[in-house]
Amino acid sequence: MALKGAEIIKRLPKTNCKECGYPTCFAFAMKLATGGAKLEDCPYLPPEVRAELEAAMAPPIKLVTIGTGDNALVIGEEEVMFRHEKSFFHETGIAILISDKESESDIEERIKGIKELHLERIGQKLKINLLALFFESGEKAKFEALVKKAHETTNFALILISEDTDVLFSGASLCADRKPLVYPITKENVSSAIPKLKELGTPAGVKGESIEEIVSLTSNLKDTGVEEIVLDPGSKNIREAVRDQTLIRRAALKKGFRPLGYPTISFPCFMYHDRFKEALAAATLTTKYAGIVVVSQVDKHFLSPLLVHRFNIYSDPRRPMTVEEKVYEISNPNEYSPILITTNYALDFFIVSGAIEEANIPAYLCIKDTGGIGVMAAWTSGKFNGEAIADFFKKYGVGDKVKHRKLIIPGVAKKLKGELEEELPDWEIIFGPLEASDIPRFLSEEWKQ
Ligand code: SF4
C-alpha cells in the first residue's frame, strides 16, 4: 500500500454521502489506506481518479502465478526487505532443471526422483514446485517430447527455457493450459514474443544483461498489456546475484519503482558446476530475494536442506511454530510405556519425539498447548504449571493409558515437580534429562531400570 490516507482523501469527492458504508470520505480514505475497504465501494470516483488510485495502491511487487490448480506457484507481493520486519509471504519456488539432451531413461529417473521427494516438517509438507525444461539438444522434436512428458506425467508447474523463440512458443502451446513461465524474453525477441504471450496467457521470464535493460523490457511489456512478469537480471555468480536481487527489491519497495516491481528468477544451476557452490547459491538466493531458484540436483541430500531452509525463511516470525495438543503415541506404546510431557512449541516436540524414536522405546508424549512457548516461559505464564498439566491429564485420560503412575517432566522444569505432586498425588514425578539429546540414554538406562 503506497498511499497514505491523507493522500487518498485529496482525490475523493468529499461529499460525505455515506454510500460506501462509512460516515465520511475521510473515514473511507483511512480504511482504504489500511486495505480494509475497496475503491469500488465509492460509486462517485471519476474513472481517471480510480485508475490513478488503483495504480498508486497496487502492491509494490506484483503477484505472479505460474501453473494452475493446487500445484500453481504464486510469487511476489512481498512487503519487506528483512523477514523480521514483518514476514516474507510467498515462498521461493524451487525448480529442477531437466535438459532435453538427457536420455529418455535419465529424464524418467529424474522425474521419478522429484516426484518421490517428500519431506514433512512441523506438520507441513515441503516439496519441489517446478520443472524447468531446457532446450539444449538443438532438436525441436526432442524439446517438444520433453514438454509433453512433463505435462502428461506430472502436475508440476513448468518453466520452458529456450533461446529459440519458435521452439519456446511451440513448447508453450503444448502446455498452455498449465500456464508455464516462458523464458527468456529478451530485447532481441520481445517484439515477436508479445503477441504469443498475450495469445497463450502465459507469464514472461524477462532476461536482461543489466538492470537497465530489464527496466526497458518490462516497460515495453506492460505498455502492451503483458503484466505477469518474472525478472532475471542475468547475474553470473552469487555476488552479482545478491547485488542484483537486492537492488531490484529495494527499488520496488523503497522507491516504488514500478518497472522493477516483479518477482525474480535466479539460476544457481548455470552459475556453478560444483554442487556445493550451487547449493550455497540456491540457499542464499532463497533468502535474498529470488522468487524462483532453478537447480540441477535431484538427490535428497542436496534438496532436503534447501527445502528446510526455505521453510524456515518463509515461516512467519510473528507467530510461534506449534503442534497440536494431544497425547502422541510413538512406536506403538502399551500400558507399561513411559509417559513424557512437554509444550507444543514445535521445536520442543520435534526434538523430544525424535529423541524418543532414537531410543527405540515406545512411549506416550503428552503435548500441552502453551501457545507455542517453551517450558520455562510457559511455566512462568501459568500455561505449563501443575494445575494446567493436571487438567490436561483429565482431558486426555492419560492415567487410563498405562498401569504405572510415573510421569517424566522436562529436566529444566525444577519448580514444576512440587506443583505436580500436589495436583497429581498418585503420580511419581521424575525429572527427565536437562538436554533432549540425553533422552535416548535416559530411557534406555534409567527408565528401563
Ligand atoms: Fe465519500 Fe464516496 Fe464514501 Fe460518498 S461513497 S462518503 S463520496 S467516499
Image (cartoon, helix red, strand yellow):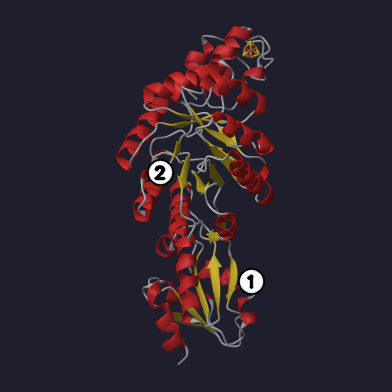
Q: Residue at x 46, y 41 (%)?
A: 87
Is residue 431 or residue 132 the one in the foreground?
132
**Residue 276 badge:** none
Quarter of image, ligand 1: top right
Q: Position of residue 96 (x, y in %)?
A: 51, 49
Coordinates of residue 307 in the picture (x, y in percent): 48, 54
Q: Secondary structure at mark 1?
A: helix
- Residue at point 48%, 51% (across, down): 311
* Residue 111 on image: x %, y %: 58, 55
Q: Taking the image as drawn, is residue 350 in sight?
A: yes
Task: Name the disc covering residue 396, or none.
Answer: 1
Q: Where residue 148 appears, x then y in whole percent?
A: 66, 45
Q: Disc number at residue 270?
A: 2
Q: Are marks 1 and 2 in contact (CB under 8 Å)?
A: no
Which amino acid is tagged 2? Phe
Rounded to the nearest angstrom, the CA distance separating label 1 from label 2 is 54 Å
Q: 10 Å neighbourhood of mark 1: few (<14), some, or many (≥20)?
A: some
Q: Is residue 255 left or right of residue 76?
A: left
Could you tell me how many numbered marks the image carries? 2
In the image, 446 versus 55, the foreground residue is 55
Q: Looking at mark 2, is its residue's CB closer than 8 Å to ligand 1?
A: no
> Label 2 neighbourhood size at 10 Å, few (<14), some (14-19), many (20+)?
some
Note whether 272 is above or below 323 in the view shown.
Answer: above
Sequence-earlier tag: 1 or 2: 2
Judged from the image, the secondary structure of the residue bearing numbered disc 2 is: helix
Residue at the outermost front position: 139
